[in-house]
Amino acid sequence: PTPAPQPTGTGDAAVQELGQKFATLNCAPDPKTKQVANPASTADPAKPTLACGTEGDAKYILGPAEVAGTDVDEAKGVLDPQRGMWIVQLGFTDGGAKKFAATTGKLATQQQPQNQFAITLDGQVMSAPSVSSAIAGGSAEISGSFNQESATELANVLSYGALPLSFEQESTTTVTAALGGEQLHAGLIAGAIGLALVIIYLVVYYRGLSLIAIASLGVSAILTYTLMSLLGPAIGFALNLPAVCGAIVAIGITADSFIVYFERVRDEIREGRSLRPAVERGWPRARRTILVSDFVSFLAAAVLFIVTVGKVQGFAFTLGLTTLLDVVVVFLFTKPLMSLLARTKFFGGGHPWSGLDPKRLGAKPPLRRARRTSAPTEPKEA
């Protein structure tokens, strides 16, 4: 057979220049980055170029691309039971089958290593099988020193290479290593400001009752810090900016539970009841509302933790943890503390600064039952 003509348009000068670059090309991995040189990453597939193998142990002069990745219909790594070896099976589209048959027909007439064709992905040669005869029929087989992992990997390269994807860089942002620390510092400041505003609101609106809320917030903060310190090394948790955001949101969730309970108690006082009965009667109604609210918050945190990755999981973890602690603090600390303080003179007597003054709350006068007077009975005559 007549040898295939050389690619047109290259010219002697271009071929000579490509040969000089090939002689000086170093494909060995960089000692620091461990990355292999990739001179073909930006090359035109329609022109000859240089390329390196993925391991950096081989370098190639590639001719123009004859068969594109979109011409591959399917590829899979299978175990040949007859030969007891792993192979890669290829299937081509109708157009790809014709191109591959023509290309392998040309290569079969060449001597080693000119009878090889390169399988490239992102400019690197993933494999370079040799051809001994033209391959027609729309299917092919690649054999060699494959194991299951390498055969599957090459099949995946051929399959994924069939996807006509390209990426364009829209923008690039360079940040310094200190930016994360600055953001975390700013997040902690924002959390402190939010906590201070919540405390000021509680003091102005609830007066003496704010002491119970502040004490409960303090207990919740201590428990949160303790659990984060214990769980951090175990699950790899770090207090980053999203985690701080979750803690800030949790301040509002915890304060909301106190407000619900306080308002239930104040409603009972408005109905004319004293503080101790109001504390006990308002708790069942507030308890249901608190449990429903915390369940919704915990459900949202659990969904976020499951479906997200990275730093968003830190936000979800902190939100879910503080929501659970809110239930623990309200049930085991806030309610018992409220029952104890209801027995004191300051709170039980309705001091104006206690936040439970019946006059300020517009309480109704207590309900009194009138004694029933028996109707006069006439003496019976004997």
Image (cartoon, grey):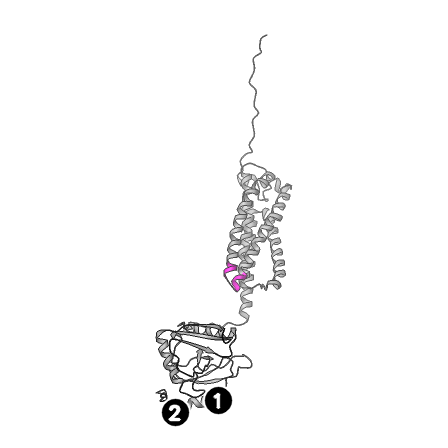
Q: Residues within 10 Å of mark 2 (few under 14, many from 20)?
A: few
Lower position in the chain sequence, tag 2 or tag 1: 2
Nearer the observer, 22 or 347? 22
Picture coordinates of residue 2, whole percent (x, y): 35, 89
Give the residue at mark 2. 13
Question: Could you say whether the residue bearing mark 2 is in a helix, strand or loop?
Answer: helix
In this rendering, does residue 193 appear at all? no
In this rendering, does residue 24 appear at all? yes
Picture coordinates of residue 26, whole percent (x, y): 50, 86
Q: Amino acid at mark 2?
A: Ala
Residue 41 occupies quadrant = bottom left
Q: Which residues are magenta?
A: 304-314
Q: Which SS does the magenta portion mostly show?
A: helix
Q: Amino acid at mark 1?
A: Thr
51 left or right, relative to 202: left
216 left or right, relative to 3: right
Give the residue at mark 1. 24
Picture coordinates of residue 171, whole percent (x, y): 43, 72
Q: In 3D space, how far apart are the residues under numbered discs 2 and 1 (Cα atoms)?
A: 17 Å
Work out whether 276 lies above or below 170: above
